[in-house]
Structure formats: structure tokens, C-alpha cells
Amino acid sequence: MKIAVGSDHAGFRLKEQVCKYLEGQAFTCKDLGVFSEESADYPDLALAVASAVQSGEYDYGILICGTGIGMSIAANKNTGIRAALCGDPYSAKCAREHNNANILTMGSRVIGPGLAMEIVVQFLNTTFSGGRHSNRLHKIEKLET
Ligand code: RB5
């Protein structure tokens, strides 16, 4: 599974930990930045990761900023992107099962690394249920046109 990962300065440290974890689990992890704690604008990184997922080259994206909110708002402006801000593993599970989310966003100033890793594991190990949830996603797709 190929994962594109990005953060702004606030999410940099947690993003580094997430990438290290993913690589240890034999995921292909593409780190799209940032590469330091120098101030950065989260929409730039959201666009980079959203584009990587949109293109089909990466299966999922993970975006981290201070709250996860800005990344979620920016990523969801991109057609075909369903970015879910998750602060607990149950939400991460439902984001995949019900919403077929293709990008996970998290807030590094909200959750610690242990919880973040549990959220990542749950997100990447849950499949979309389909069925009634597909009909709902089709309605969302119609909003994009
Ligand atoms: C940066 O200070 C902060 O605004 C950003 O990381 C994020 O929380 C925005 O939603």
C-alpha cells in the first residue's frame, strides 16, 4: 500500500514519527514535506498530498497540522478527495467503513503520538463497507459537479 504524507510546521514532528512507523510496517511512504519546523502554509501541503491521491499513484494520504482542521478543509476542496479529521480510532474506522475516506487528517496539538499511531493503524486496516454507504457517496460526488 502506498501512502502520501504531508504536514505543515506544526505537524512536522508527528509527521516524521508517522513516516517512520509506516516504513517499519513495510508501507511505501512518500514524504511530501515539510522538512523542518519553519513556518509553512498548510494548503500547500494539502494540495500536494491530495494531488498524489487524486492521480491514483498513492492509495491514501495522511495530513497533519496543528488541529487537523485546516488540512481537512483544504484537502476536501479537491475533487474525489474525502479527507477525514480523526481524533480517535473509532472515527478512523468509520471514516473508512462508511465514508471511504482517502485522506486522514490529524492535529498534532490535539493528540499525542501514541493515539495518532492507533488512528493510523485503524484507518489503514479498515475497508469500505459499500452498500448503503455507496449511495451516499454518489450523492457527495454529485455535489462536486
Ligand atoms: C498553524 O499555526 C496552525 O494554524 C495550523 O497548523 C493548523 O492548525 C490549521 O488548521
Image: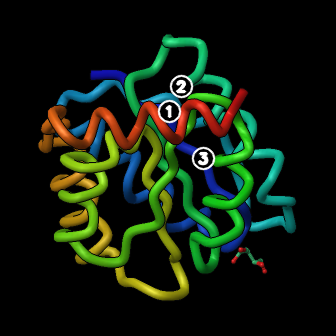
Mark 3 touches mark 1? (CB < 8 Å): yes
> Residue at 32% across / 35% down in the picture?
135
Left or right, residue 14 beside residue 55: left
* Residue 6: assigned label: 3
Q: Nearer the viewer, mark 3 or mark 2?
A: 2
Left or right, residue 136 beside residue 76: left
- Residue 125 found in image quarter: top left
Q: Is residue 9 above or below residue 2?
A: below
**Mark sitting earlier along the chain (3/2):** 3
The crowd level at tag 3 (other Cα within 10 Å; few <14, some 14-19, many 20+) is: many
User: Which quarter of the figure is the C terminus placed in?
Assistant: top right
**Mark sitting earlier along the chain (1/2):** 1
What residue type is disc 3 on? Answer: Gly
Residue bearing mark 2:
53
How far, Cα to Cα, is label 3 from label 1? 7 Å
> Residue at 26% across / 76% down in the picture?
88
Q: Name the one closer to the observer, 130 or 17.
A: 130
What residue type is disc 2 on? Answer: Val
How far, Cα to Cα, is label 1 from label 2? 7 Å
Residue bearing mark 1:
4
What residue type is disc 1 on? Answer: Ala
How far, Cα to Cα, is label 3 from label 2? 12 Å
> Residue at 85% across / 60% down in the picture?
40
> Residue at 71% across / 67% down in the picture?
70
The crowd level at tag 1 (other Cα within 10 Å; few <14, some 14-19, many 20+) is: many
Residue extending farthest to the bottom is 110
